[in-house]
Image: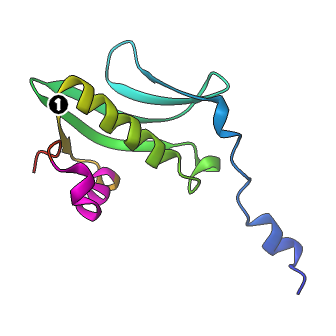
Amino acid sequence: MRESPKELSSHKPKPKIMENIKFEISPYQDELQILIDGKKVGYMSISVDGRLLNVYYTKINEDLEGHGYAKLLLDKLVNYAEEKDLMIDPECDFVRQQLENHPKRYRGIWHE
């Protein structure tokens, strides 16, 4: 069955090639950023207070939503927390949901 032009226009564009992705902590250390080809396409708003890594919200460019970039950010955030011996305090709904759905993976770094 062929899709109508209206149905075709509702499809999201395919994500860019994963090998061009980099992560950075912003100069003020208030964001974990995801960059594609050097351009910021999303971030997690964060702060560190002692051993707590607070995560306030996650934002991905609208045209890239639904392609797994938020999960890539979360993976990098978890690696960062593990390297720095921090506990993640998720105020962000996305992060909290992931931690709740995968308690074995995030045991030991989740500040409940």
Residue at 68 percent across and 25 percent down: it is 37
Secondary element at tag 1: loop
Image coords of residue 9 (percent x, y): 80, 65
In the depicted structure, whether residue 59 falls above or below residue 105: above
In the depicted structure, whether residue 112 falls above or below residue 20: below
Residues drawn in magenta:
95-107
Residues 16 and 28: in front is 16
Is the stretch drawn in magenta largely helix, strand or loop?
Answer: helix
Q: Is residue 11 magenta?
A: no
Residue at 87 percent across and 78 percent down: it is 4
Image coords of residue 89 (percent x, y): 17, 42
Image coords of residue 62 (percent x, y): 59, 48
Image coords of residue 106 (percent x, y): 23, 50
Choose top left, top right, bottom left or bottom right for residue 32: top left
Q: Is residue 82 left or right of residue 32?
A: left
Q: Please state which amino acid type lies under the numbered disc 1.
A: Leu
Q: Which residue is mark 1?
A: 86
